[in-house]
Amino acid sequence: MSTLRRLDIHLATSGAFDTVVSAIKAAKPVDYVVYLTEQKDRRFISVFLREGTVQGLMDNLQAALEGSSDWRITVCAVEATVPRLEEISQEASSKREQSSREEVYQQVVSGAKLDRDYIVLVVLSTIVAAIGLNSDGVAAVIGAMVIAPLLGPILAFNLGAALGDVKLIRQGAKTLMAGIGLALLVSLLLALIMPLDLQSRELMSRAEVRLDGLALAMAAGGAAALSLTRGSSATLVGVMVAAALLPPGAAIGLFAGSGEWAYALRAALLLSLNVASLIFSALIVFRLRKIRPRGWIEQQNAERAVWLNAGLSAVFLAIAVALILLLDLGKKISIG
């Protein structure tokens, strides 16, 4: 059975009411009902749509109601319906399995808040990650990545770029930088009270910059953006994103706090490359999924923001890959 969305529309009967009803009919909904309310000059309309057809109707409704102020549209998920809906073709289903721009935006905004819960989770996850790295405890490092709340700000930054929303870009960047900075501070303080174990494989692997690490970060960014636009659970994807950010961040603090500046710089390079990889791949997915603003002018601004961020990330990654290949070549020559 195809997933349904219900649009609840509250509006006045005067003005754009007829235009709204026409837009609903043109969207070919599964069903729609117009309710009378206690207020004689208002109507309540419930529209049932297949998932993926919501965005077109949302855009048309907002265009029709743009000159009005006394209206509201609410999007709700429908868990089940009886009788069963007729199945659509697999090709049509794949095109329709996408959340609306408004649903994606609301989900991202709620996950990019710099609040007390975010700060507490970053502190706790960093403590667990730092101890796990130093003691070569794989389970502890994985547990830290599970609770690390770093997926939200990464997605907020990329969605802001895709929509040309400067406010959302700033919010995502601020929350991400605050999280990484807090992780560095916590791990730095931990390094002052516990001896550093340079024999730990988990720790020393975060001082290595390799192509497979960049591939992991790019896969994590793309999977995160894809799961968001499809309305899928992002829990496991959040672990992938945290794997690219939290352990290198904690390793920088541990190395720096112990005076191992060469290793700290390598871990910092790994972290910065992972951030660039996450941003680049998520931007590509948002682009392919056609996440963009409704208005033409906003689309042009978003276009420039996407290409600017993607271009800078691509250049940074190209330089990094060249450096990695040169370092690998240097090692082989020295060994030979």
Image (tube, grey):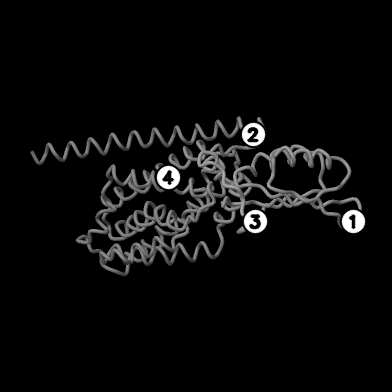
The answer to whether the residues at label 4 and label 2 have Cβ atoms under 8 Å apart is no
Residue drawn where x is 26% and y is 55% of the image = 260
Q: Which residue is the site of mark 3?
A: 83
Which amino acid lies under the numbered mark 3 shown in the image of this protein? Answer: Pro
Q: Which residue is the site of mark 4?
A: 278
Work out how far the residue at label 4 is from the one at label 1, CA to CA, in angstroms: 50 Å
Q: Quadrant of residue 182?
A: bottom left
Q: Which residue is the site of mark 2?
A: 298
Q: Nearer the viewer, mark 4 or mark 1?
A: 1
The answer to whether the residues at label 4 and label 1 have Cβ atoms under 8 Å apart is no
Mark 3 or mark 4: name the one nearer the start of the chain: 3
Whether 253 is drawn above or below 101: the answer is below
- Residue 39: numbered disc: 1
Work out how far the residue at label 3 is from the one at label 4, CA to CA, in angstroms: 43 Å
Q: Position of residue 114 (x, y in %)?
A: 55, 58
Q: Secondary structure at mark 4?
A: helix
